[in-house]
């Protein structure tokens, strides 16, 4: 279980997070919804130790603020960043190999084909494109590869930063079915960042609404979907899906 208490984050003298409390219990999908610049990405960067913070971030009782970014990945917390960042010059298969590093080590050519097979079963389009270079994939396929690469690390917690960004609605629908499948079938808890509130609340157990570095509203996703404050501020704009 991830447990964040009183989290502040800073870029130089700018305070991007102003005292966040947030939890991700085992087995759940929880989402953070908020406008551009609210601080969503900064929450994930704080967990991954990529930004200066104050406050407590506990993972199964361990204090993450005391360890390095590489060690956070070794703890099984895997961050799929905004913009995907797959390796354009490597093939799909090679990108997946890189993902297995936290688990198998640089030279651990043991049994990752089994893990690759699991990823291909979840994302059959990646199997079809196994030997294609990263740059030649569509946006949706790149997002699948970024998530597939994260799965290669055998995550105990997945941090997903705006997976729907820039993708066509049908592609998003398919992708989100796969995200739910990862959670339900592999029991991986997920902290999901989205600007698309309706989409996020539809797949989540619980949601947090972030505004200017603070959580202003939180609750079970079912309740948030009917909350007039959220309907007005977040669901109107994205009511299409
Ligand atoms: N590297 C940075 N340097 C300075 N300010 C930053 C940096 N990254 C983000 N910020 C600021 O922190 C705030 C939160 O950013 P971010 O977490 O990226 O928001 P979101 O993901 O919700 O769009 C914004 O005001 C943004 O301008
Ligand atoms: Mg962001």
Image (tube, rainbow, N blue to C red):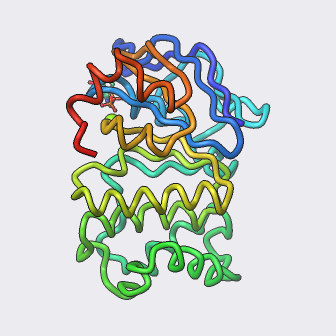
Disc tally is 0
The residue sitting at 51% across, 32% down in the picture is: 222
Note whether 26 is above or below 133 in the view shown: above
| Quadrant hosting residue 130 | bottom left
Quadrant containing ligand 1:
top left
Q: Is residue 187 above or below residue 50?
A: below
Residue 51, percent across and down? 46, 30
Residue 41 spot, x, y in % from top left: 39, 34
In the displayed structure, would residue 237 be above or below residue 130? above
Residue 97 visible, this orientation:
no
Identify the residue at the far front of this view: 226
Q: Is residue 233 above or below residue 143?
A: above
Q: Indicate the position of residue 17 as horizontal and vertical percent values.
A: 44, 17
The residue positioned 72% from the left and 36% from the top of the image is 1
Q: Is residue 71 left or right of residue 132?
A: right
Residue at the spot x=66%, y=68% of the render?
Answer: 105
* Image location of residue 202, percent across then percent down: 44, 42
Examine the rendering and report whether any part of residue 9 can be seen.
Answer: yes
Q: In this orientation, which residue lies closer to the viewer: 106 or 211?
A: 211
The residue most toward the right is 61
Front one among 32 and 38: 32
Q: Nearer the viewer, residue 160 or 29?
A: 29
């Amino acid at each position: 279980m991830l447990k964040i208490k009183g989290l502040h984050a800073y870029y130089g003298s700018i305070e991007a997070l102003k005292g966040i409390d947030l939890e991700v219990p085992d087995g759940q999908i929880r989402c953070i919804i908020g406008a551009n610049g609210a601080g969503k990405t900064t929450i994930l960067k704080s967990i991954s130790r990529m930004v200066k913070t104050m406050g407590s971030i506990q993972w199964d009782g361990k204090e993450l603020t005391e360890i390095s970014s590489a060690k956070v990945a070794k703890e099984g917390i895997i961050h799929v960043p905004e913009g995907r960042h797959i390796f354009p010059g490597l093939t799909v298969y090679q990108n997946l190999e890189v993902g297995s590093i936290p688990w198998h080590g640089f030279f651990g050519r043991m049994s990752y084909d089994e893990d690759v097979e699991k990823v291909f079963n979840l994302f059959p389009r990646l199997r079809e494109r196994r030997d294609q270079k990263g740059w030649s994939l569509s946006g949706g396929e790149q997002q699948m590869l970024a998530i597939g690469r994260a799965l290669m690390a055998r995550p105990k917690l997945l941090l997903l930063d705006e997976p729907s960004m820039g993708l066509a609605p049908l592609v998003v629908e398919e992708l989100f079915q796969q995200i739910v499948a990862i959670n339900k079938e592999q029991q991986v808890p997920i902290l999901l960042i989205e600007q698309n509130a309706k989409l996020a609340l539809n797949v989540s157990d619980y949601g947090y609404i972030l505004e200017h570095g603070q959580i202003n509203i939180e609750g079970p996703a079912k309740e948030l979907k009917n909350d007039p404050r959220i309907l007005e501020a977040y669901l109107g704009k994205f009511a299409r899906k």
